[in-house]
Amino acid sequence: MFVLICSTLLLFIRDSSAQTGASLERRNFCQRDFCINLIDGEITAEAGLCVVIPCSFTTNPMFTPRGFVWFKCENECSASNMIFSSDSSKVQSAFRGRVSLLQPDVSKRDCSIIINDLTASDSGLYQLRVTGFHFFGKPEDGYTFSSTATVSVKELIQKPTVMVPPLTEGWQSTLSCTAPGLCSGSAPEFTWMWRGGGGEKDSHITGNIIDFAIENLNAVSQRHSSTITLNPSFTQHHNSEITCRVNFVNNITTEETVTLKVNLYPKILNSSKCEVQSDVLTCVCASEGLPLPTIKWPLLENHTQYSVTTTVTSNTVTSTLALTLKDQSNTVVECVSSSEVGNVEKSLSMITSERRKDQHSLIPWVVVAAVSLSVNVVLIISLMLLWNKRKEVKPNQEDTTYMSLKKRDQSAEYDVIGQPLN
């Protein structure tokens, strides 16, 4: 278990120091029969996180260690600079509760410590004193090693790790954010913020389920994380940004921002249909999705002569099928749209063009009938007008005839005829 703790924390130290190119070679520093093994060089750490000072020692065979005392040396190493002791009352208040042994069993002769919640003021030299007694009962109560470990605390540059699973509209997803460092100090605070694709200002996410977790890797190392549940919407979340901000003690903050990509499940649009004209079947299938789906026609498995054209516009792909089909009875045309998100299929409705032509052919006959009716009406009206005009003319002619009959002829012939017989 102790080996696991050391390997985990030393790996963390290597990762932190690798960013600055610091050497992590360890060496022995010996005086008389007392030796201490420390890192030869500067141990680099970042504010807000933690630092491990690897340490082991050997002593005179007659000396039995009983405990450790660590000092942070300012101008000198003295009791007033104590940062760790079995008697916590003697420890500086600024370090109280922040320093722990990696191995509590002193007999293992491992003096490594971890310092949590680092600040820039923690940079400096650290010195070890081993307390104990000699086998022969000499009054000597310990040994202070003159060699020291050097710690340098830099500005926090590590960022949280944000994990985003594939997002699909309508499918609930969980995003996670893990704080940098494997430290057992104060738990950091997590804040999730979202910014729309249109460049809106950051807004705190409060309407979703947010959980916080602490994973104890071992006695002195922990992993802090936060998760958020999101119901992705393509129009709202696609190409938007989500930020996880981690705030450590002393107002030390780091954050990471990722761009969300939301997939669209394939959807076959209602405009998809088939049309039959003579023996030619023409089908159009339009499908929307992201990533762009591919369209297949299962009907083509039994045919060899056909043509298929495909066009792409934004998030929509359109496939047009042309096929000679003499026997159209019991023909079912299916369109299958597939992508890495999923697939969907639809049976397309079939329209026969001839029927539409019959309907269109009725239109000229209706026009002819209407024109014929109009002409007939005009003729009838014209005849009626002529008839009425004719009636108006006839009475004048009769009156003239009548008047001629009434007219007396003054000739002699008429006088003779007109005389009475004796």
Image (cartoon, grey):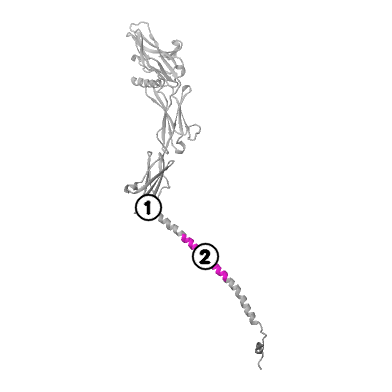
> Magenta region's main secondary structure?
helix
Classify 376 as above or below 147: below
Direction right: furthest residue? 410
From where the camera sits, is residue 153 visible? yes
| Measured Cα–Cα span from mark 1 to mark 2 | 43 Å
Can you say which quadrant of the picture contains the C terminus?
bottom right
Q: Say whether residue 378 is left or right of residue 314.
A: right
Q: Is residue 201 magenta?
A: no
Q: Nearest the camera: 11 or 114?
A: 11
Q: How many numbered dots are placed on residues in this image?
A: 2
Q: Is residue 371 magenta?
A: yes
Mark 1 belongs to which amino acid?
A: Val
Q: Say whether residue 394 is left or right of residue 239.
A: right
Q: Residues within 10 Å of mark 1 (few under 14, many from 20)?
A: some
Mark 2 belongs to which amino acid?
A: Val
What residue is shown at x 65% (from left), y 87% (from top)? Answer: 414
Q: Are marks 1 and 2 in contact (CB under 8 Å)?
A: no
Q: Nearest the camera: 55 or 339?
A: 339
Q: Nearest the camera: 326 or 84?
A: 326
State the residue position of label 1: 280
- Nearest to N terminus: mark 1 or mark 2: 1
From where the camera sits, is residue 220 visible? no
Classify 141 as above or below 17: above
Q: Which element is circle 2 on?
A: helix
Q: Position of residue 22 (x, y in %)?
A: 40, 18
Q: Nearest the camera: 122 or 111?
A: 122
**Looking at the rendering, which quadrant does residue 354 occupy?**
bottom left
What residue is shown at x 50% (from left), y 64% (from top)? Answer: 372
Q: Position of residue 150 (x, y in %)?
A: 41, 15
- Magenta region, residue range: 364-386
Q: Which mark is residue 375?
A: 2
Q: Position of residue 283 (x, y in %)?
A: 39, 49
